[in-house]
Amino acid sequence: MNKILIIDDDPTICIMLQGLLNKKGFESDIAFSANEGLKKFSSFKPNLVISDFRLPDINGLDLLKQIKSLNPHMPVIIMTSYAEIRTAVNAIKLGAYEYITKPLNPEEILVLINSAIEKSKTVEKVGQTKKIEFIRGNSPNSIQIDQYINLVAPTDMSVIIEGESGTGKEIVARRIHEASARKNRNFVAVDCGALSNELAGSELFGHNKGSFTGAITDKKGQFEFAKGGTLFLDEIGNLSYEIQIKLLRAIQEKKIRQLGSNNDIDTDVRILVATNEDLIKEVNKANFREDLYHRLNEFKISVPALRDRKEDIKLFADNFLNLSNQELNKNINLFSDEFIQKLKAYSWPGNLRELRNVIRRALLLSTGERIETSALPPEILHYQETTSIANNTTDLKLIQASTERDKIIDILREVNNNKSKAARLLNIDRKTLYTKMKQYGIEG
C-alpha cells in the first residue's frame, strides 16, 4: 500500500485529502507544520508528500529542499494558489514533481498522485529508457529547434540546452538521444537541483560501503547506469564547485571514481545538460567553472518560452487535451475560439507545464461538447497585457529619476520578467535596461 504524507496548517484540507486518499486505497498521515512534517517523514516513510506552500514555520520551498536532502527521489506535490504561479515554478526548479492549485479538484489530485508514484518507481529502475510522446511546433522557433536536433543528434557532442523552467528541455534531450547512435542504450536523467552537496557525488559516481555515514551497501552511480548511452544533467548550475571538478575529470578522461574507492572505472556516456540560468554569468561570478562550461558547450540549443511561440499554443493545447482525455477517461475534443484566444493572450510564466495543468483542469470542469472560457482560472480569464508603449506613463525617459527603480520593477513584474517586452514598454533598449537593473540592484 502506497503511503502519502499531507502537510498543511488547514485542518479542513488535511481531513478532506486524507478521507479521499484512504477511500482510494492509500495509507495517509497528516502534519500541520513543516517541522512536524519532517518528523513524520522520517517515521512514516511515505511514498509521496503533498505540502501546502504557506506553512506557519517555514515555507514550502524550504521544506522541499529539506525533504530532497533526505531523499532526492521523493516525489513532492506543492499546493498553491493561482496568484503564486511563479512560486510554483520555483518549486519545480527545486525538484518538486508538480504543483496543484487551490481550490483542489479530487480527480486532478488522484491523477497527479498516481503519475508521481509511477514515475518514482520508474526512476528506481534507471536502466530503462523512457519512451515519450512529443509534438513538434510550427513556429519558426520550433522549426529551428528541430533543425538543431537533427544536426547534433548523430554526433557525440556535448550539448547545453537552456531555457526557462517548464519549456521542455528534457524532451529536447530525449529527442537528441532517440535520434542518435546510442538510442538503444540507456537515457539517464538526473535532476541536479534536487541533489544536496552531500548526495551529489554518490548519486553521480556511486560509493563503496562504509565510505560515509549511511553508506551501508555499495552503490552504482548514474554514470555507470548510463554506460554506452546518454546522461542528461538537468539544472547543471546547481552542482557544487567540488562536484564540478569531478564531473570535468569524468568528461575529459572518461573515468570516474566511486566515493571511498581508489580504483577508476571507465565510462562511455554522452553528456547533455540543461539550465534555466545564464551559465556565462555564473562563470563570471565564479559559481561555475569556466573550463567545465567550455567543455560542455560544444553545441547549444535555446528553448524559447511559450509566450515567444504563441503560434504553437493551439497545437500544444490539442496535444495536452488528448493526453488528459486518456488520463481522466473523458471525451471532449474541442475548445471554443475564445478559449484559445485567452490562452494566446496569457504570458505563461510556467510555460508548457502550466499549459498542461490548465488544460487538464479545464477538462475536469467541462461537461459539454467543447471547453469554454468558464473553465479557465481567473488570472488567465481576466489577464490583460501591460499598457502599450504609446502610453507615456511607462516611458522611462519621461519618468523622474527618483521613481525610475520602482517603475522598472513594476514593468518587469507585469510582463513576467520578459526583458525584451519590458524594454519596449519603457522605451529603452535591452542594454540600457540591464544597465539600469545593475545600477539599482534589481534581480533579473
Image: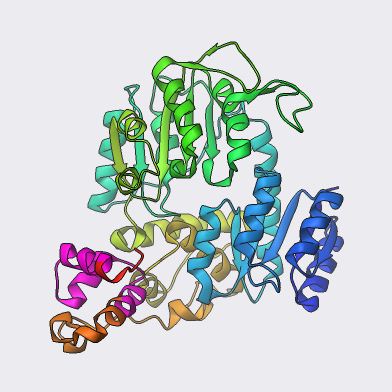
Q: Is residue 292 left or right of residue 88?
A: left
Establish if 69 lies above or below 348. above
Is-magenta flag for residue 433?
yes
The range drawn in magenta is 409-438
Q: In the rendering, at what x and y percent does residue 278 appear? A: 33, 49
- For image coordinates 41% across by 33% down, the residue present is 272
Image check: 92 left or right of 26? Answer: left
Res 116 seen here? yes
How was the colour assigned to the protein in this rendering? Answer: rainbow
On-image quarter of the C terminus: bottom left
Q: Quadrant of residue 339?
A: bottom left
Q: Where is residue 404 in the image (x, y as percent from the top left)?
A: 24, 81
Where residue 202 sits: x, y (%)?
62, 30
| Residue 356 visible | no
**What is the magenta segment's predominant secondary structure?**
helix
* Residue 226 screen position, x and y as percent: 54, 23
Q: Does the magenta stretch include residue 349?
A: no
State whether residue 133 is above or below residue 25.
Answer: above
Q: In this view, does 292 lie to the left or right of 183?
A: left
